[in-house]
Image (cartoon, rainbow, N blue to C red):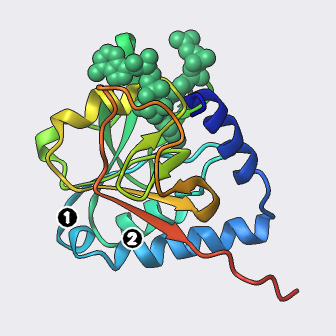
Amino acid sequence: MTTKQIVREQALANLADFSDKQRAQFMQQTVAKITALPAWQAAQVIALTLSQEKELPTDLLIQTALLQHKTVVLPRVLPKKQMVFMTITQDTSYEKHKFGMLEPVGGRVVTPSEIDFVLVPGLAFTTDGQRIGFGGGYYDRWLPQVAAPKIAVSITANVFSQPTWPIETTDQIIDQVIVLDEEIDNE
Ligand SMILES: Nc1nc2c(c(=O)[nH]1)N(C=O)[C@@H](CNc1ccc(C(=O)N[C@@H](CCC(=O)O)C(=O)O)cc1)CN2
Ligand SMILES: Nc1ncnc2c1ncn2[C@@H]1O[C@H](COP(=O)(O)OP(=O)(O)OP(=O)(O)O)[C@@H](O)[C@H]1O
C-alpha cells in the first residue's frame, strides 16, 4: 500500500511520457469513445473540464459537444473546496485561477440536478471506479449532489485492478473508466 500522493506523482509521470502526436490521438479517441456512449447521446447538459497541461486533452470533446448543440458546463472553484458549473459558448473567455487552471468568465450557473453527464477528471483509477485527482477533494465533495452518469478517461498505465492506495470514506466511485489505446506510432 502506498499513499495517494505517490500514486498521483507516478500517474503524472506516466502522462508526461507521451508525444504531442500521441496526445492528439488520445484526444480523438476520447471523442470517439465518449460520444459513442448512449448516456452521452441522451444527455443535453454535459459537465466537462478544460484540461490543464498534463491532463488528457478535452478541447476537441468540448468543441464536439457544442457542435452537437449540447449545453456545456465547466467548473469554477469556490472557497471551502466547492465548485460551481457555468455554461459556456464558443465566445466564452477564460481567466487563469491562482491555482493554475483556466476558468470560464460569465455564463449561467447550473445546478447539479440539471446535469445529464459528467466527465470526471482524474489521474489514476481502478477498473471498478475508484479515483485519484489532483488532491483538492473538489469532485469528492461535488459528485454526491449529482445523479447523472460519471465517466472518466485514462491511459492504461494509470488504471489498476485494485487500489494501491488507502481508500477514504469521502472518495466517490465513478460509473465507468474509458481506457485509451496507445496506438503504434508509424512515423
Ligand atoms: N482541468 C481541470 N479542472 C479542474 C479540476 C481538474 O482536476 N482538472 N478540478 C478537480 O478537482 C478542480 C480544481 N482542482 C484543483 C485541485 C488542486 C489544486 C491545487 O493546486 N491545490 C494546491 C493549493 C491548494 C490551496 O492553496 O488551498 C495544493 O493542493 O497544493 C488546484 C485545483 C476544478 N477544475
Ligand atoms: N466530502 C468531503 N468532506 C470533507 N473532506 C473531504 C471530502 N472529500 C474529500 N475530502 C478530503 O479532501 C482531501 C483531498 O481528497 P482526495 O485526495 O481524495 O482528492 P482528489 O480526489 O485527488 O481530488 P479532486 O476531487 O479535487 O480531483 C482529503 O484530505 C479528503 O479527506
Where 97 falls versus 185 (above or below)?
A: above
Residue 134, image x and y in percent? 54, 32
Q: Which residue appears farthest toward the right when viewing the image?
A: 187
Tell me which residue sits at (54%, 41%) in the image: 164
115 vs 68, left or right, is left
Question: Closer to the N terminus: mark 2 or mark 1?
Answer: 2
Residue 90, image x and y in percent? 44, 55
Which quadrant of the figure has residue 79?
Answer: top left
Give the number of the disc on residue 4. Answer: none
Q: Is residue 111 visible?
A: no
Q: Which mark's residue is nearer the viewer, 2 or 1?
A: 2
Q: Mark 2 sits on what residue?
A: 34
Ligand 2: quadrant of the figure: top left
Disc 2 within 8 angstroms of ligand 1 (CB): no
Residue 108, image x and y in percent? 25, 36
Which quadrant of the figure has residue 104?
Answer: top left
Q: Amino acid at mark 2?
A: Ile
Mark 1, residues whose alpha carbon is within 10 Å: few (<14), some, or many (≥20)?
some
Q: Mark 1 sits on what residue?
A: 43
Which quadrant of the figure has residue 28?
Answer: bottom right
Mark 2, residues whose alpha carbon is within 10 Å: few (<14), some, or many (≥20)?
some
Q: Which residue appears farthest toward the bottom when viewing the image?
A: 186
Residue 124, image x and y in percent? 54, 47
Q: Where the N terminus falls, by quadrant?
A: top right
Tell me which residue sits at (56%, 45%) in the image: 123
Tell me which residue sits at (52%, 57%) in the image: 58
Q: Amino acid at mark 1?
A: Ala
Q: Secondary structure at mark 2?
A: helix
